[in-house]
Image (spheres, coloured by chain):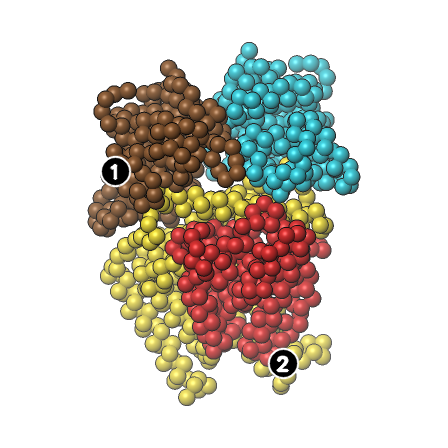
Chain colours: A red, B yellow, C cyan, D brown
Amino acid sequence: MHITEGVAPASVAAAGALLTAGGVAMGLRAMKDEQIPRAALMSAAIFAASLVIRLPLGPSSVHPVLNGLAGLLLGWAAVPAFLVALFLEALLFQFGGITTLGLNTITMAAPAVVCYAIFNRPLRRCRQKNTAFLLGMAAGVTALLLSFALWAAVLVLSGKSLIVIVKLALIPHLAITAMEGLFTGFVVSFLFKVYPGVFDLPLTREGGVAP
Amino acid sequence: MSCTTHFAGHTVIHRLDPRPRIVATLLFAVFIALDNPYPVLATGLGVGIVLAMLARLPARPLARRLLHINLFMALLFLTLPTTTPGEPAFSIFSLPFSRVGLHLAAMITLKANAIVLAFTALLGTVELSALGHALQHLRVPDRLIHLFLFTLRYLDVIHHAYEDLLRAMKARGFRPRMDLHTYRSYGSLMAMLLVRSLERAERVMDAMKCRGFKGRFLTYRPFDFHRRDAVFCLVATIVLCLCASLRWALPGGPQ
Amino acid sequence: MSDNQPLLRLSGVSFRHAHAAPILNDINLALHPGERVGLMGAIGSGKTTLLHLIVGLLTPHSGQIDILDKPRREERDFWEVRERVGLLFQDPDDQLFCATVQEDVAFGPLNQGKCREEAHQAVHKALALVGMDGLEDRITHHLSGGEKRLVSLATLLAMEPDVLLLDEPENGLDPPSYERIRSLLLSLPQAMIIVSHNAAFLQTVTTRRLRLVEGKVAGAEP
Amino acid sequence: MSDNQPLLRLSGVSFRHAHAAPILNDINLALHPGERVGLMGAIGSGKTTLLHLIVGLLTPHSGQIDILDKPRREERDFWEVRERVGLLFQDPDDQLFCATVQEDVAFGPLNQGKCREEAHQAVHKALALVGMDGLEDRITHHLSGGEKRLVSLATLLAMEPDVLLLDEPENGLDPPSYERIRSLLLSLPQAMIIVSHNAAFLQTVTTRRLRLVEGKVAGAEP
């Protein structure tokens, strides 16, 4: 679901870069120096998982995207975290690209921040394991649907005829979204049981309370 | 095994200061991504190929990267000409392929390959932490750099932890299937590694405190700017200027 | 050696990592029912590698591995092996990855295709065997070092294996946990290969002892 | 005990995690210049906790900690302590958090307020001490286990501490690296507390040995 090098015209790519710069500034402001190791280790775990884990889906398998989870755990810091992860992906595997780095960051990180805004607070208030699972699932599904919408918007803005690519990707993407929801649900309900304080961490950033 | 290795080597490109390489790559990529007539794109592709040869990029990994990009491009060549309305260039099985669609697909393909080649040759050859520090010298915010360096430092550590746990799961008879048990197990694996990452983050923070960290990150790596770097800057400027003048001089370019 | 069929036999097995010196060089080894074989050797001598070869997590460079009367070569051959040969990892944190003890011990039986009810019974039985019954709902991650070791062992026993491969099962345990593991191992009917640095421990627990030196099995010790 | 002032002294120190049984209970301990004290005990007996209390990463529940002739209570008190007491962590991957050896070893000196030139010299000197000079530009995560341990030690030595606290410095090393660490520790002038499971190692390296049992220092061993 990356936007490949060369697809986006300069104006669209520039808009993406500007939006990303704003989001990154927000993310960096919400983070203190001593929170950097924690943000980096969490995003490294998420990034590594998205490379290593292959969820079986029909005859094939797919990697989880995990931007809903990243939003729940990192809040605004998800934006710089995704910028770093996507830059590394472009360098190491040529997924995405350098001119589309801003667009790809927005596509992944904006839904993460939205998930944080919607689901983090209910998750911290929730007392039931099954509710935690459902909230996690909702976050996973919401993030992937939003990402798809943004990705489609970028392609259509880049050239009206690219809508055919969007149409081709729609059905597989819905299947991936369902799986991502289940997977995120399981991860969140595990964390809820074992380490419930983990969902408070993005908040300590903004409040400036010591970790 | 490491998942964070760059294209190491000892070529002329590898020896250049990473800072001008970053600037040149960015300018080149942005320029190529603009609307350009074919001769400019062809020149750009040529520049990319020359850089890849100078950097002696290993054939197999480079081919894999280009294949990855060009599979998508092949999809564009199949879909765009058949769905974009316009004067047909030719038709296969009475399915018309429009000239406009072909033009669009060809433009994107040329742009992508030119940028990927230059990007891989100039930046894919920099050791990744050096790249981070070079970006720091280029005024990228310190916190973003430290986030990058920490992520890089622990990516392999976490990757190994994943592999160890996956191996232990396999040893207990785990075979991935499309069922809830599989998803739940992978979910546990992911969550367990998040918990362990958080605990490691605390220990890393402790280690930093023990070495006098008081809230401000101080790291530093110097770079040397040699005469060969000045030559590189000069050549890069000339190439970019030539491409730019070609773009504005040719019919079809912006007036 | 007894004349009954060995549970597992390694014949001329060698292993090396890519572009490195061989770690194991022409290993011959057989494990018979009822045997508890101790395996010693310096760090890096290939003890863990040997255990991983037996369950097919690594593939030998040459030689043959026969387990339960069949040669085992490919990944598929080892699917059956892994259900009947349990491997205890050195670090319980590598073995335990579920939220609760219950889920972790049930993981193996569920992989074996057991239904929830059967798995539940297997969990109960295995935890009772290691003396940890009643702790089903504890968070695995919060257990002490000794408890984690016992739960790891329970995750294997729940699969009702014929053979146990134990990688330093006594390492770092406090005296009560050490004693508990020791008497537990003596009471289990499975054939075992036990890797350890602790000669005194192996002396009391195993029926014979071997030492890995420079990639070879260097003769039995008393 | 000698009559000169101890470098550090713990008097009646107790520690427990919230809502848990005490890990350390009324600990009394002093370290004098030139001493190398070995500290043994099972997993979870509080050895690491003790080291973390000394550098102020944990705060004791009761009791007093005097280091370098001053009582130390608050975070700020420990800033000076951490510049003069170096703690080697169990896992070098926790300690080495920078990309290259050079940056990692320079991190401490830079925090001590040294300029780049001075820090550079400190790095050079520390790496030479552990026999790793010339490896300044190596990528940290490409180092072997033994090299990581040596570089970790160099990160401490670069700060020129008076005391070293070493948490299992020999654990998991292959025989050559083990020997290297052993002779290095014998050659260093600093007073040390060395935590280990390895009695033989402590026997050859330390001047006296203590054992933590049930939260108490259970008398010196020979």
| Quarter occupied by the N terminus of chain C | top right
Image quadrant where residue C98 sits = top right
Residue B218 image point, x, y percent: 31, 52
Q: Which residue is mark 1?
A: D160
Q: Can you give x and y, in whole percent of width and height, for residue D113 in the image?
A: 24, 49
Residue displayed at 62% across by 86% down: B87
Name of the residue lying farthest toward the top: C222
Label 1 marks a residue whose chain is D
Answer above or below: position of C40 versus B78: above
Which chain is disc 2 placed on?
B
Quarter of the image where the C terminus of chain C is located: top right
Q: Relative to residue A207, is residue B83 drawn left or right?
A: right
Query: Which residue occupies the extreme front position in the image?
Result: D62
SS of the residue under disc 1: loop
Q: Nearer the viewer, residue A18 or B52?
A: A18
Closer to the eye: label 1 or 2:
1
Report the residue that reaches farthest toward the bottom: B255
Q: Is residue D7 above or below residue B186?
A: above
Identify the residue under disc 2.
Answer: B84
